[in-house]
Amino acid sequence: MPVIAVVDYDMGNLHSVCKGLEKAGATPNVTYSPKELERADAIVLPGVGAFDPAVQHLRSRGLEQPIKEAIASGKPFLGICLGLQILFESSSEGTQPGLGIVRGKVRRFIPEPNITIPHMGWNQLEFTQPKSILWEHLPANPWVYFVHSYYVDPIEAQIRAATVTHGNQTVTAAIAHENLMAVQFHPEKSSNIGLQILSNFVAQVREKIPA
């Protein structure tokens, strides 16, 4: 089975992510070792919490450059929730610079009457890259589980793989470009749809492992 490094930087629900990857047919390896990231077949960057502590924890563990090098090398990479947001250049939630792997900013939902912030619960995806490997074997407009007050706003619109609408605001729910994929929702909490998304990611990892 492919070995997938799950990055441990004290900012994620690692147990549920690992269980999801196991069900999808992978062997998760929770680690903060740059050498383990290099040896793994793929990397998952989960995340729950605030932007500034997340990037500070990553940098204090010397993980920023190894993550950038892994993505640049073509290794399959999946960011989840906060693990999507910290790939961007900056966030209105904090003052620390993000990793800057994706051009753009993280923004807060604009308050509206009759909508809740954070955006929390089940909502439907609208695919903007319907042929992305992430969405294989999924129905149109599947329901997935969100918990967030901030959303990513990429400068390059073509990397947007899906959107979600909350109130009157339609925002990016996922990005995908070559080996780099990241989602705002929690696939590990999204029942069978989430498991299929993780299985699609694992299938791409298998394709890249030399025979």
Image: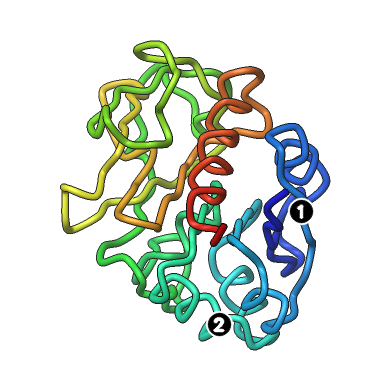
Q: Is residue 166 left or right of residue 187?
A: left
Q: Is residue 29 left or right of residue 101?
A: right
Q: Is residue 127 above or below residue 88?
A: above
Between 103 and 120, the residue placed more toward the observer is: 103
Marks 2 and 1: which is nearer the front?
1
Q: Is residue 53 left or right of residue 157?
A: right
Image disc number at residue 28: 1
- Bin the neighbour count of mark 2 within 10 Å (Cα to Cα): few under 14, some 14-19, many 20 and up: some
Q: Is residue 9 left or right of residue 120?
A: right
Residue at left 30%, top 61%?
Answer: 105
Q: Secondary structure at mark 1?
A: strand
Residue 162 image point, x, y percent: 31, 33
Q: Which residue is mark 2?
A: 66
Residue 36 image point, x, y percent: 72, 76
Q: Amino acid at mark 2?
A: Pro
Q: Is residue 47 above or below residue 137?
A: below
Q: Secondary structure at mark 2?
A: helix
Q: In terms of sequence position, does the residue under pointer 2 or pointer 1 come before the other?
A: 1
- Asked whether the beta carbons under mark 2 and mark 1 sit within 8 Å of each other, the answer is no
